[in-house]
Image (cartoon, rainbow, N blue to C red):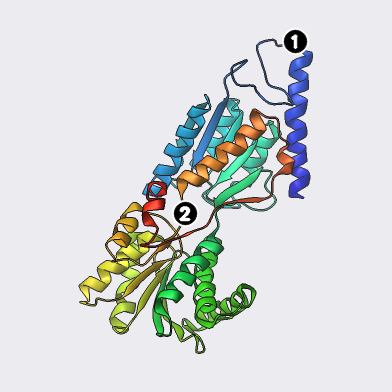
Amino acid sequence: MKKNKKMALFSAVLATSLLTAACGDSDSSKGSEGKKSGGGDKIEVGFALKTQDSPYFVSLAEAVEKYGEEQGWDVTVLDANGDVQQETANIETFIAQGKDLIFLDAIEPDAVVPSIDSAAEAGIPVINLDSGVAEEANDVTTVYSDNRQNGRLVGLEYAKKMGDKPIKSIVLSGAKGNVAGYERRTGLFAGIIEGKLGVSEEEAWKLAEEFEKQLSSKGKASNDDAQFSVVGQGWGAWTEEEGLKAAEDLVTANADLTTVLGENDQMLFGAITALENAGIDGVDIVAAADGAKKAFDLIKEGKYFGTGLNSPTLVAEKGVEIAKEILVDGKDPESYDEVTLTEPAAIIKDNVDKYYELGF
């Protein structure tokens, strides 16, 4: 269904272009082969951003502006401040302004579908950045980091570090039912199990799914062969403050932890404070993904094991690249997959300098 809707979007853009040509609008360079740089109207794009309440989203907005303006485009960012109704209004504003393309970082995957479809009906392609939307939405693609492989690569590196030593951990998760969080933690589980047992990646994913089922049903999980256990799961709402709250009781109840696992850096910053408050040291801090420069600094100091490459710079760069292909080169929106992933990487002390400027 989604691919058919994408074809409808392309047909709408093409029909609009043909109508413009038939009317003899000599000032417009819109057409089925895209707007050519240096001639005709200037390309105008909008970015409907969910929030700017964390460094990641601020960096994402700045990167979209930077890469768009390097193309000679006018880029307008509207912040919904976490309000679904404001997000709808922002997209409606972009449609009314006749933007050539809309970037979107959606608040909720289902609530935004009518707005995306309205843009498509107006012949305006929508590219999602960072957050996915419901499958039936009439968008072009969703660009974000490879949560599964980021987690797995970090897990593999951590298994290498631990060798035959047992891992007794807690895990801090963002929000119940969140797909990205699920992918990140199961990626960590898969990488650790794969590295500790020496099994294939395929087998490791199966074992990680079993591990996750234990965790969701019992609140704890273990793989005895890998000497790997999670003795508790806390929900930290992706923030440092809530990460601290989620970690406090778990840390107090498990003073012999080797490891705190987490689905992003911010929650783990809170866990570090919880450990310090409890007077516990020597615990490894392992994030499935994020890429905060604060984490990179701690990695350099040996106070944080590692994190996965979730770079707003790379997400913005890829999004603008796809937009250029559609708007300038005339590429068919139908040709894109539902998801476009950036390159995954485990960032640890050995390579943190290589990735530092991609952080936020």
Would you call the spot at circle 1 few (<14 residues within 10 Å), some (14-19), or many (20 or more)? few
122 left or right of 207 in image: right
For the point 52% across and 89% down, the residue is 225
Q: Quadrant of residue 58?
A: top left
Taking the view exactly as shown, the residue that stands out farthest to the front is 350
The answer to whether residue 246 is seen in the rendering is: yes
Instruction: Using the image, determine if residue 75 lies above or below residue 339.
Output: above
The answer to whether residue 234 is seen in the rendering is: no
Give residue 215's position: percent from left, percent from top: 50, 80
Give residue 306's position: percent from left, percent from top: 39, 64
Residue receiving disc 1: 24
| Label 2 SS | loop
Taking the view exactly as shown, the residue that stands out farthest to the bottom is 224
Q: What residue type is labelled 1?
A: Gly
- Which numbered tag is attached to residue 140? none
65 left or right of 327 in image: left
Instruction: Using the image, determine if residue 228 lies above or below residue 329.
Output: below
- Foreground of the two, 263 or 71: 71
Q: Which amino acid does label 2 sit on?
A: Asn
- Which numbered tag is attached to residue 310? 2
Give residue 155's position: percent from left, percent from top: 47, 71
Would you call the spot at circle 2 few (<14 residues within 10 Å), some (14-19), or many (20 or more)? many
For the point 71% across and 11% down, the residue is 25
User: Which numbered disc, 1 or 2, marks the residue closer to the eye?
Assistant: 2
Q: Would you say the residues marked 1 and 2 are in contact, meaning their CB atoms lie under 8 Å apart?
A: no
17 left or right of 187 in image: right
Instruction: Using the image, determine if residue 146 lies above or below residue 318.
Output: below
